[in-house]
Image (cartoon, grey):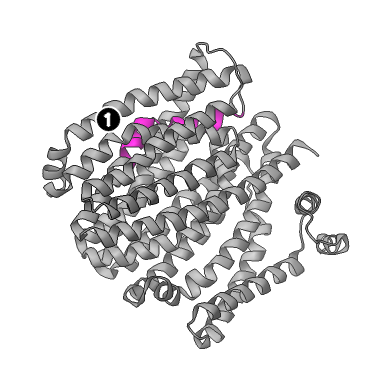
């Protein structure tokens, strides 16, 4: 098996592990969030949301983009350099985060009163400010874990330990009758546990070599990483600014309805998140040791299956969006159905375009990545200000979808210009056209008469997905790369997959 074949297997295997972890994390985190929202007052839950947002932006700034630097450089440097590089990154992050976290915690009364105009959120700001060092360390440790391509470690830390500890502590806080400070502590303390666990697992994965000063390597990593801070801040803007602007232009009820739609579309976002978890380090390793064509050979089948997966996810999230929201969250949230459809469409397109990001990262083009993210954030902010007063939460969904497609669309154009090739070719457009045909006919003719029960929606969604996947395989077959993956899966997992069927699909 060639290095490229092994890389493809790494991406697919890692994506499967991470996808399962993300799914579990979503379910557990959702349960904790619902419990906290029902227990606290509206203003108390708003304080919790404000604190977590500050924690997010504080840890991004404190990290100086070093998590992305470790993801890129760990696969390509000598084993003797890895432990020293990680230790330097952890030390820099710790010093920065203690400074920023201390300023936020000590300045909590001023931030609450002068910035947010609400002294009641002071306690949440103070608690989450104190947690910034742990969140920043968690980010840099998981960046290193990505660089070492340890998918299971990511699942243990981010997808299982953190949401489980949070859920347990929220339950304890509710049982003990604690106030906003208790719930905020229940959200913040898991960062202490998971950052410690992530650092232990990261160092376990590194070669046991003596520490030494790596000035030149550290400088290279820093030059690459620092622009990623702008990308991180911009990412924070287009992840969170719509919530604050909906609250400003509309009201807290609208925020709740939109929040449900945004949470539901997380099941669509998982597709690209899982694939790209290992995509960046694998692309970096191949680009460093092999060449551009090997990188493309990895990502072209990935792009094709992201089209197929996104089309299948769009059935319940896009076609049956209103029914999905009503059945899962309650009829009072049905107004979020159209917003969910718009978000699902935007994230479906973004899923496919997202394969360009890891390739651009592997080329060391962190400034381009930062430019794309900042521009997308500015567009997101402008569109939200323009569209929310006109179209409400649907306007916010449009702004979010457009900004994500713009960011990854720019990366696609840049990859085409820099490398004179692209991972998105006919292998993507064919399945996309079939998806438009199948979903279009289904939406117009069948979907309106389907009974709105959970069993019916699940059954029909599964049937449509099966019809679509079979249509794609019959019309376009599978590539030699996909044959290799199927045969590897057959051998490793004992899948009942006849060789004549594989050969038939390969010859299509």
Residue 382 seen by the camera: no
Q: Front-most of 402 and 345?
A: 345
Q: Quadrant of residue 257?
A: bottom left
Q: Front-most of 16 and 465?
A: 16
Left or right position of 95 against 352: left
Residue 462 drawn in magenta: no
Residue 157 seen by the camera: yes
Q: Quadrant of residue 231?
A: top left
* Residue at 76 percent of width and 69 percent of height: 474
Q: Residue furthest front?
A: 176
* Residue at 36 percent of width and 74 percent of height: 330
Q: Front-most of 114 and 432?
A: 114
* Residue at 36 percent of width and 25 percent of height: 94
Q: Position of residue 200 (x, y in %)?
A: 50, 29
Q: Position of residue 366 (x, y in %)?
A: 47, 34
Which quarter of the figure is the C terminus placed in?
bottom right
Q: Quadrant of residue 437?
A: bottom right
Residue 67 drawn in magenta: yes
Residue corresponding to mark 1 = 100
Q: How many marks?
A: 1
Q: Is residue 211 above or below residue 327?
A: above
Q: Which residues are magenta?
A: 56-75
Which quarter of the figure is the N terminus placed in?
top right
Q: Is residue 231 above or below residue 345?
A: above
Q: Residue furthest right?
A: 500
Q: Is residue 131 above or below residue 212?
A: below
Left or right position of 247 against 455: left
Of helix, strand and loop, which mostly describes the magenta segment?
helix
Q: Position of residue 108 (x, y in %)?
A: 17, 38
Q: Position of residue 315 (x, y in %)?
A: 54, 72
Q: Residue furthest bottom?
A: 449
Q: Secondary structure at mark 1?
A: helix
């Amino acid at each position: 098996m060639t290095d490229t074949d092994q890389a493809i297997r790494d991406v697919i295997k890692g994506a499967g592990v991470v996808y399962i972890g993300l799914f579990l994390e979503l379910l557990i985190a959702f349960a904790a969030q619902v419990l906290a929202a029902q227990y606290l007052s509206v203003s108390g839950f708003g304080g919790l949301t404000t604190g977590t947002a500050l924690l997010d932006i504080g840890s991004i700034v404190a990290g100086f983009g070093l998590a992305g630097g470790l993801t890129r450089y760990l696969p390509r440097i000598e084993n003797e350099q890895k432990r020293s590089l990680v230790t330097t990154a952890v030390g820099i992050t710790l010093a920065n985060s203690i400074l920023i976290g201390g300023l936020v915690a000590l300045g909590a009364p001023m931030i609450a009163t002068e910035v947010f105009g609400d002294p009641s959120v002071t306690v949440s700001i103070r608690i989450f400010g104190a947690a910034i060092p742990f969140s920043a360390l968690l980010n840099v440790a998981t960046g290193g874990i990505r660089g070492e391509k340890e998918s299971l470690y990511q699942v243990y830390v981010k997808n299982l330990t953190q949401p489980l500890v949070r859920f347990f502590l929220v339950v304890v806080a509710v049982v003990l009758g604690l106030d906003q400070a208790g719930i905020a502590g229940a959200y913040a303390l898991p960062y202490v546990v998971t950052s410690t666990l992530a650092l232990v697992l990261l160092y376990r994965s590194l070669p046991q070599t003596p520490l030494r000063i790596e000035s030149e390597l550290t400088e290279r990593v820093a030059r690459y990483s620092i622009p990623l801070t702008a990308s991180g801040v911009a990412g924070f803007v287009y992840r969170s600014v719509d919530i604050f602007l909906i609250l400003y232009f509309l009201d807290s009820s609208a925020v709740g309805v939109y929040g449900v739609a945004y949470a539901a579309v997380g099941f669509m976002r998982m597709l690209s998140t899982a694939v790209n978890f290992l995509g960046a380090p694998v692309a970096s390793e191949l680009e460093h040791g092999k060449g551009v064509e090997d990188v493309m050979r990895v990502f072209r089948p990935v792009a094709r299956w992201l089209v197929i997966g996104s089309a299948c996810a769009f059935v319940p999230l896009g076609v049956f969006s209103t029914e999905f929201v009503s059945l899962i969250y309650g009829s009072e949230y049905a107004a979020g159905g159209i917003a969910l459809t718009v978000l699902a469409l935007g994230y479906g397109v973004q899923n496919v375009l997202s394969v360009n990001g890891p390739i651009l990262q592997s080329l060391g083009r962190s400034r381009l990545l930062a430019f794309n993210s900042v521009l997308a954030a500015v567009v997101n902010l402008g569109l939200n200000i323009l569209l929310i007063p006109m179209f409400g939460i649907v306007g916010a969904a449009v702004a979010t979808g457009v900004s994500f497609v713009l960011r990854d669309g720019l990366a696609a154009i840049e990859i085409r210009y820099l490398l004179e090739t692209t991972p998105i070719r006919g292998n993507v457009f064919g399945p996309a056209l079939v998806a438009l045909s199948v979903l279009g006919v289904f939406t117009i003719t069948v979907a309106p008469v389907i009974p709105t029960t959970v069993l019916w929606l699940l059954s029909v969604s599964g049937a449509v997905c099966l019809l679509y996947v079979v249509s794609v395989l019959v019309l376009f077959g599978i590539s030699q790369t996909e044959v290799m993956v199927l045969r590897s899966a057959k051998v490793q997992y004992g899948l009942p997959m006849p060789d004549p069927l594989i050969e038939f699909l390969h010859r299509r």
